[in-house]
């Protein structure tokens, strides 16, 4: 049996597992799979099927090579490399972040792991925007600051969805904050 046939078996076996998403994007309001959510299960499946997966990085691309250790056939999954500029991180930490993300995306691609779907039913062109509510805490505060600095919510609405009631509340909260700042500046 070839590496491709065994990879298909691994995909089917993984689909039968109950995986939980532990990663949280609090700003955008969705969860995602971290490597630790699925890689231990994948490694056991690969061991049972006599497959080995190795990730390698080059300057311009990363590769996941899945090899059948019985007949040496292999499947390669490729992706372009990218960079990260995380606040307060050194170059090595940014490199580590890139490698972790790329590893996750390679494994997710190879095993056809379903993540947050960009396409939502009839909305075939744009990703679903997370709902902005006062309960979003930091996101709500950032939206207020955007409104105060730009005088509109256009940029907020490009990334977040707002009900009419929440838009009205956000504007009222922003104006109350502006009044408070002006009052404190006078005092």
Image: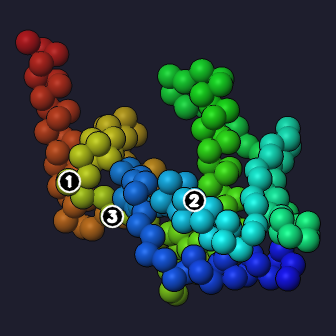
Q: Position of residue 12 (x, y in %)?
A: 62, 83
Q: Position of residue 55 (x, y in %)?
A: 76, 50
Asked which quadrant contains residue 173, the reply is top left
Of the 4 image quadrants, the one containing the N terminus is bottom right
Q: CA distance from mark 1 to mark 3?
A: 10 Å
**Residue 89 visible in image:** yes
Q: Is residue 82 left or right of residue 129?
A: right
* Residue at numbered disc 2: 39
Of the image marks 1 and 2, the number of the one nearer the N terminus: 2
Q: Is residue 82 left or right of residue 182?
A: right
Q: Position of residue 65 (x, y in %)?
A: 82, 59
Q: Is residue 21 left or right of residue 47?
A: left
Q: Nearer the viewer, residue 127 or 175?
A: 127
Of the image marks 3 and 2, the number of the one nearer the N terminus: 2
Q: How is the image coloured?
A: rainbow
Q: Nearer the viewer, residue 35 or 49?
A: 49
Q: Position of residue 139 (x, y in %)?
A: 32, 47
Q: CA distance from mark 3 to mark 2?
A: 31 Å
In what element is the residue under mark 2? helix
At a point 62% along the width and 48% down the height, the residue shown is: 101
Q: CA distance from mark 1 to mark 2?
A: 36 Å
Tell me the tag on residue 92: none
Asked which quadrant contains residue 49, the reply is bottom right
Tell me the tag on residue 131: 3
Farthest right residue in view:
72
Of the 4 image quadrants, the one containing the C terminus is top left
At a point 75% along the width and 58% down the height, the residue shown is: 53
* Residue at numbered disc 1: 134
- Please tell me whether residue 6 is drawn above or below residue 73 in the rendered image: below
């Amino acid at each position: 049996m070839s590496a491709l046939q065994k990879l298909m078996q691994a995909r089917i076996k993984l689909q039968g597992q109950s995986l939980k998403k532990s990663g949280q994007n609090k700003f955008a309001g969705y969860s995602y799979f971290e490597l630790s959510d699925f890689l231990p299960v994948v490694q056991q499946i690969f061991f049972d099927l006599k497959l080995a997966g190795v990730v390698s990085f080059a300057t311009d691309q990363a590769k996941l090579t899945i090899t059948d250790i019985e007949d040496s056939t292999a499947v390669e999954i490729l992706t372009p490399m990218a960079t990260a500029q995380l606040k307060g991180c050194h170059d090595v930490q940014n490199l580590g972040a890139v490698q972790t993300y790329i590893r996750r995306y390679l494994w997710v691609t190879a095993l056809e792991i379903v993540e947050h779907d960009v396409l939502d039913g009839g909305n075939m062109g744009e990703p679903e925007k997370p709902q902005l509510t006062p309960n979003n805490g930091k996101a709500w505060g950032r939206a207020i600051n955007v409104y105060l600095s730009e005088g509109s919510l256009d940029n907020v609405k490009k990334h977040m969805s707002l009900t009419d009631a929440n838009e009205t509340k956000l504007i009222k909260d922003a104006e109350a904050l502006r009044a408070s700042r002006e009052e404190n500046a006078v005092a």
